[in-house]
Image (cartoon, grey):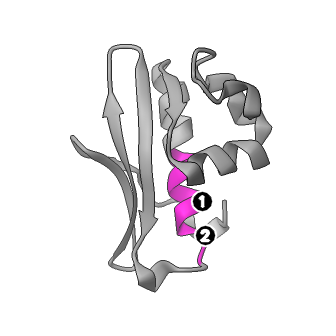
Amino acid sequence: MKPEFENIPLNKTDKRFEINFNGHFAFIDYRETTHQIALIHTEAEPELAGTGAAAAVVEKTLHYIEEIGKKLLPFCPYVFAFIKKHPEWKRIVDEKFEGYDKL
């Protein structure tokens, strides 16, 4: 993650994980069960295009999921691609996830 995002807190609402950078948001929509968190859709406001904000919110969210001990279901194509690029994160993906063997 780019240094400018390291100290920005991850906010969790009942529907999304988000970061606020200079008044603009990057976020991930999610669904949560007792043992899993499904990441559905990642988006950054147009003002954040190319800044690394989307990657930062993904990385912060993955750290959060690992810290609370839940398994990840990476339905979002952006998150799926992020994990393919950073295979160390496969450690938190639920082995039952349909695309697990493609990561």
Which residue lies under the disc numbered 2?
52
Q: Start and end of the magenta stretch?
A: 51-60
Residue 76, image x, y percentages: 50, 47
Amino acid type, residue under disc 1 in the picture: Ala
Which residue lies under the disc numbered 1?
55
88 versus 24 height, above or below: above
Q: Quadrant of residue 4?
A: bottom right
Residue 89 forms part of the magenta stretch: no
Residue at point 70%, 29% (across, down): 90
Looking at the image, residue 84 sits to the left or right of residue 57; the answer is: right
The local crowd at label 2, few if under 14, some if 14 to 19, many if 20 or more residues have their Cα within 10 Å, is some
Q: Are marks 1 and 2 in contact (CB under 8 Å)?
A: yes
Residue 50, image x, y percentages: 61, 79
Amino acid type, residue under disc 2 in the picture: Gly
Residue 54 forms part of the magenta stretch: yes
Q: Main secondary structure of the magenta part?
A: helix
Residue 69, image x, y percentages: 50, 18
Residue at point 33%, 14% (across, down): 34
Residue at point 33%, 28% (across, down): 32
**Closer-to-camera residue (25/39):** 39
14 versus 1 height, above or below: above
* Extreme-bottom residue of the structure: 47
The quadrant of the picture occupied by the C terminus is top right
Looking at the image, residue 82 sits to the left or right of residue 27; the answer is: right
Q: Give SS at disc 2.
A: loop
Residue at point 56%, 58% (across, down): 56
